[in-house]
Image (cartoon, rainbow, N blue to C red):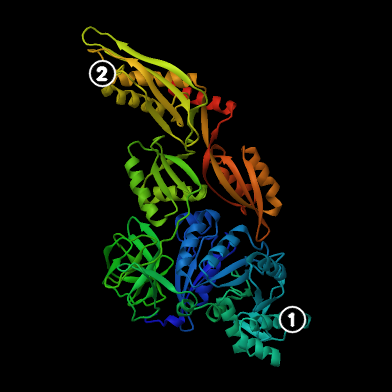
Amino acid sequence: MANVEVGKTRNVALLAHSGAGKTTLTEAILFNCGAITRMGSVTDGNCVTDFEPEEIERKITISSSLAHCEWKGNALNIIDTPGFINFLEDTRICLKAADGAVVLVSATSGVKAETIKVIKYAKEYEIPIIVFINEMDRENASFQTAMERVEQSFDLKPVPLFVPIGEGEELEGLIDVVGSQAFKRSAKGYDPIEVPPDMSSAVAQYRKTLVENVAETDDALLEKYLESGELTTEEIIAGIAKGSLERKLVPVLCGSAQLNFGIQQLIDAIFDCLPSPEKMSSLRSIVAKDVKSGENVSLKTERSAPFAAYVFKTIADPYAGKLTLFRIYSGELRPDSNIHNSTKDSKERVGQIYYLLGKKQIPAQLLGPGEIGVVAKLKETLTGDTLCSEDHQVVFPAIQFAEPIISYAIEPKTKGDEEKVGNGLHRILDEDPTLKFHRDAETHEMIIAGMGQIHVEVALHKLKRKFGVDVDMKPPRVPYRETIRGRSRVQGKYKKQSGGKGQYGDCWIEVEPLPHGAGFEFVDKIVGGSIPRQYIPAVEKGIVDKLKEGIIAGCPMVDIRVSLLDGSYHAVDSSEMAFKIAGSMAIKKAAVEASPVILEPIMKVEAVAPDDNLGAVIGDLNSRRGKVQGVDSQAGGNQKINALVPMAEMLTYANQLHSITSGQGLYSMEFSHYEEVPVHLAQKIIAARSKKEEE
């Protein structure tokens, strides 16, 4: 659609937990809009927006996808987002490009923890929502129960616009609450029928509640309603849109994406009840920082304004190159343009510009404010960057990406592929900023970290498919530390004669523990020149190097003070090397005599679980040597458990929590402090180190 008016555009994200039907709903919307000629199926792996091999294999949405279509002369951009817990950060990032959202709620399984989480994201961005109660054709479907769960979980006032005639296998039509009209599904569409007598009183009550809620959104409407007891259809629709925009109420529709039932009504509601980019900008100012002045400026959703766009997603492809998905907030973009990346302070050359329909690129001649587009092969631009006119440089606030919660060590199956692993993963990291990759300086392992085991597995599957590198994945080594609990005073003496110039170094040191987190302290107490000044740094270096290696378990020793007390030297045979070795010998002996212990990292853990699983989750944390610090009630019948748990016990926790809560649990963790490892576990760590040294 060329030169689409900003008021006729809708940018809508589909939100829900995994398996609620977002991708199927996308197919139904695209089919009704004429963008596709037949609906694909997640089971068959032929959906428009789930096109990555990993998505087809696992039958879940892994990465947000964009689908552009038209409806009655309007433009609609659908963002089909992941609902699986490992990939919700992608959903959060892509929501920045949306002006509204459709939240799917299953008529059978209701609201899950992931749904509540994505609703929080929508609230964070002040995005109005519509609720679509899906799967009304399933056995045990209940519209009323789903409505109650929406009200309990979302902290918003639900107002039904359509209610079903029948449920489960008896689903046969819809009732328009605003117009008090009933429609029966037929081969040609929806035929008007009389409202079933057994539903007339319920529909009347729905409408009465709807009108009252709408009237409360506006003083003028409330005054009219109190005077006349009624509002016109136009006033009701306008009131619903206003209430939705201000998040005072949430319109509710129902149907079945699988059966393409109630979808046309949903699309109409998207345009009636969710805002255009122009309308959305009246609610929340589009704020960016002027690069030159450093001051915040409000951008205008106008074609004549300077160009400014936000990059919300990057897709890396080894053949097609990098695809950059962006949302324009002001101005226009044409093919063959020169633009500026104000985040990187670099120039970019734009070739052809496109709309996206899944992986299909639709050429565009012009993109204006509020539109979402894609361009290929930008050199510097990544997710989170700002693209703008070089003459009017602005930059949008940087988005904060969540820190990974699980890490794995990886090793290429083919020797010599380490460089290929690094190069390939850095390309994958370009499209997924929630993945992290580094080489651990302490363990020398290549570490990849993500939002869960499935997240990491998918990234490594892409690494193999796109870049031809296969790796093994295993839990990383825990970064244990060593320290001492006592004091000791020892001599380190190195003396070697081998016919000619010998080696001689002699030092006395004293060691004592320091408070947690104090690190290492070296104190020079030499007086009278018992050790010449030029050799003292060598003693310290020998001590530091040995502490890095570890004394009892091969882990760095920390929180220790070493005082150099005395020593002796030889005028001919002494050297820096000799005193370095003497220092190393001394610290090894001293640490062993000063009650050495092993420390382990303790993590601050927040786990969210349904009420029914609270006891099981707490019990599992206790079994992991965790210490529960408290429990707080959350919206939607969930509980948040705060605990301190050793990192060694949390390496595969994501899988266990998923199992205990049937996929409804969430958790996050961050480093808290180090604590002493229990003796029986410390012995195992020391034994494992000894075995490795023998091997």
Q: Which mark is residue 114?
A: none
> Is residue 476 shown to the viewer in this render?
yes
Quadrant hosting residue 103: bottom right
Question: Mark 2 to mark 1: distance in Å?
Answer: 96 Å
**Tag 1: amino acid:** Gln
Query: What is the crowding at mark 2: few (fewer than 14 residues within 10 Å), some, or many (at least 20)?
Result: some
In the foreground, 506 or 471: 506
The residue lying at 52 percent from left, 32 percent from top is 599
Q: Which of the two discs, 2 and 1, labels the residue nearer the N terminus?
A: 1
> Can residue 48 be seen?
no
Q: Give left or right: position of 109 versus 196.
A: left
Image check: 685 left or right of 303? right
Instruction: Point out the image quarter for the C terminus.
Output: top left
Identify residue for label 2: 575
Q: Residue at x 70, y 47 (%)?
A: 615
257 left or right of 319? right
Of residues 400 and 92, which is closer to you in this image? 400
Label 2 sits on what residue type? Ser
Snapshot quadrant of residue 376? bottom left
**Which disc, if any, is residue 205?**
1
- Residue 64: x, y in percent? 47, 62
Q: Secondary structure at mark 1?
A: helix
User: Between residues 350 and 194, which one lies in front from this camera angle?
Assistant: 350
| x then y, percent, for residue 290 | 34, 69
Q: Is residue 525 left or right of residue 148?
A: left
Decide: marks 2, 1 in contact (CB < 8 A)? no
Query: What secondary structure is marked by label 2?
Result: loop
Q: How many marks?
A: 2
User: How packed is label 1: few (under 14 Cα within 10 Å), some, or many (20 or more)?
Assistant: few
Rendering coords of residue 320 (x, y %): 33, 60
Most extreme residue toward the left is 500
